[in-house]
Image (spheres, grey):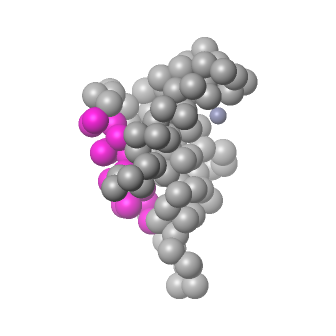
Amino acid sequence: MGEIAENNMGNMNDEQAGVFFEMVRSELGLDLEFGITPTSPSICLGSKILICENDLQYPWFTKQMILHEITHHLIPNDHTHGSSFHKKYAELVGIFLGGERG
Ligand SMILES: [Zn+2]
């Protein structure tokens, strides 16, 4: 499991990342799996997203990476992060990184 260095300054651990993922997954009603991987980069593989352990950083960073990969699941035909991707990503950021859930 992704160990967090003793000198970390507030990084999320894999369990915390999983809790955030599950909150988003359940609220959106997605059939989607989550995992942490040592392999870079973080990636969406169809019905599974894998977050690279290097992306277990400050909560705002790790959460936006999770939302990024979930957006790839929702908008599977926009691999170049174009307007369709951005519209959905921005929507998810507004829902899950704003207010009390941020
Ligand atoms: Zn991407």
| Count of numbered circles on the image | 0
Depth check, front residue: 69 or 93: 93
Q: Identify the residue shown where x is 56% and y is 46%.
A: 65
Depth check, front residue: 88 or 94: 94
Residue stretch rendered in magenta on the structure: 13-27
Q: Residue furthest bottom?
A: 6
Residue 21: % across, % down: 38, 46
Residue 2: % across, % down: 49, 65
Residue 100 in sight:
yes
83 lies left or right of 66 = right
- Snapshot quadrant of residue 15: bottom left
Q: Residue furthest right?
A: 80
Q: Identify the residue shown where x is 62% and y is 59%.
A: 54
Q: Residue furthest front?
A: 99
Q: Identify the residue shown where x is 56% and y is 79%.
A: 8
Residue 93: % across, % down: 49, 41
Indicate whether 21 appears above or below 90: below
Q: Magenta part mainly helix, strand or loop?
A: helix
78 lies left or right of 5 = right
Q: Quadrant of ligand 1?
A: top right
Quadrant containing the C terminus is: bottom left
Residue 46 in sight:
no
Q: Identify the residue shown where x is 45% and y is 49%.
A: 97
25 lies left or right of 98 = left
Q: Residue furthest top?
A: 77
Quadrant containing the N terminus is: bottom left
Indicate whether 8 appears above or below 56: below
Residue 75: % across, % down: 53, 20
